[in-house]
Image (cartoon, helix red, strand yellow):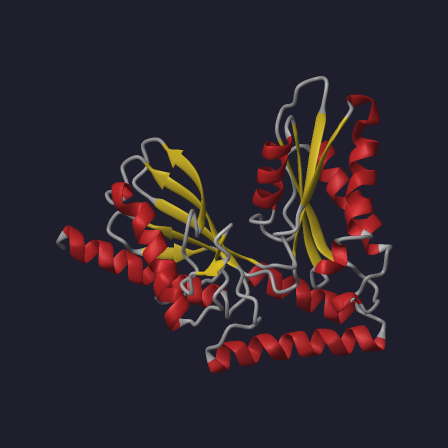
Amino acid sequence: MERQEALELLTGKVANFVGLVGKVLPGDVTAKLKELSENETVPMAKMIYEFMEKNQREAAELNRPSCQDTGLIQMFVRVGTKFPYIDDLKPVLKEAVFIATKEAPLRHNAVETFDEVNTGTNTGTDAPWLYWDIIPNSDKLELDVYMAGGGCSLPGQGKTLMPGEGYEGVVKFVLDVMTSYGLNACPPLLVGVGIGTSIDSAAFMAKKALMRPVGSHNANPKAAALEDEMTAAIDSIGLGPQGLKGSKSVMGVNIENSARHPSVISCAVNVGCWSHRRGTITFNSDLSYQSSTHEGVAL
């Protein structure tokens, strides 16, 4: 097909996928919510889980976003150096968000800083926000599409610790955040923790951690054990669904980490709501596609 035709096709498919992410939760999140509901013993909490399931079912049936805050669109872009449309990708993704805003529809959430003007399109200065990763010798495009809501991952927090505080200091910081800011979002939460050498890298990793599947673990056994320990610790707070008390507080804790300078440990926390609107889609060079989060999706 002609290049312009291919770009329009790619734009339309990404726009449709963005709209879908706002209406249908990824399979791993749906499965975890069902597990939490089945194991819940507090009657009110169990009732809330049932309404969560009803909310998602009706969003899909009525073709409407499942949450009124469709967030600011953020994307993790992993694009191969041989993907034929790499040069046009940034404007394609911006146009896709513009189209999804009208057709999904999405709430108008992009406000130009200082000017305090809502663009009405969910696009603007560096909006949608794109995290880039260039993959050598690949002809594929893989996108994580994420609706970052005003109560969940956007009010993330971070802190640089002295090395003497150790990983105990990291745990204390995470728990301090979860017992104060945690309820800005809607539990049960997916908690992303980034640990590294500077506050900007830690913040990036905390957001990246939210793109990992629920139930996955860090490749480092020590970090994986800490994920489980922090999950148990935050569960013991008893937030329950919607913060109205229950047996569990989180869907899990995902930790991402990097090497660090010996004189600092930087830590950041981001959380996703129970309605964790994340989607991953991979495009081949011929623009055929498959999604690991929304199997069998037809765009």
* Residue 14 seen in this snapshot: no
Query: Position of 206 compared to 59: left or right?
Result: right
Q: x and y percent of residue 81 in the render? A: 30, 35
* Residue at figure coordinates x 30%, y 62% from the top left: 12
The image quarter in which residue 159 lies? top right
Q: x and y percent of residue 267 in the render? A: 70, 35
Query: Position of 168 compared to 293: left or right?
Result: right
Query: Position of 150 compared to 15: left or right?
Result: right
The one of 148 and 279 positioned closer to us in this rendering: 148
The one of 61 and 165 positioned closer to us in this rendering: 165
* Residue at figure coordinates x 69%, y 60% from the top left: 185
Is 45 drawn above or below residue 121 in the view shown?
below
* Residue 25 seen in this snapshot: yes
The image quarter in which residue 257 lies? top right
Query: Position of 92 compared to 144: left or right?
Result: left
Q: x and y percent of residue 62 in the render? A: 48, 82
Q: Dividing the image into 4 quarters, which one contains the N terminus?
A: bottom left
Is 137 drawn above or below residue 260 in the view shown?
below
* Residue at figure coordinates x 82%, y 77% from the top left: 44
Is 122 drawn above or below residue 204 in the view shown?
below
Residue farthest toward the top in the current orientation of the protein: 262
Q: x and y percent of residue 23 in the render? A: 50, 70
Q: Dividing the image into 4 quarters, which one contains the C terminus?
A: bottom left
Tag count: 0
The image quarter in which residue 20 lies? bottom left
* Residue at figure coordinates x 76%, y 59% from the top left: 183
Residue farthest toward the left in the current orientation of the protein: 2
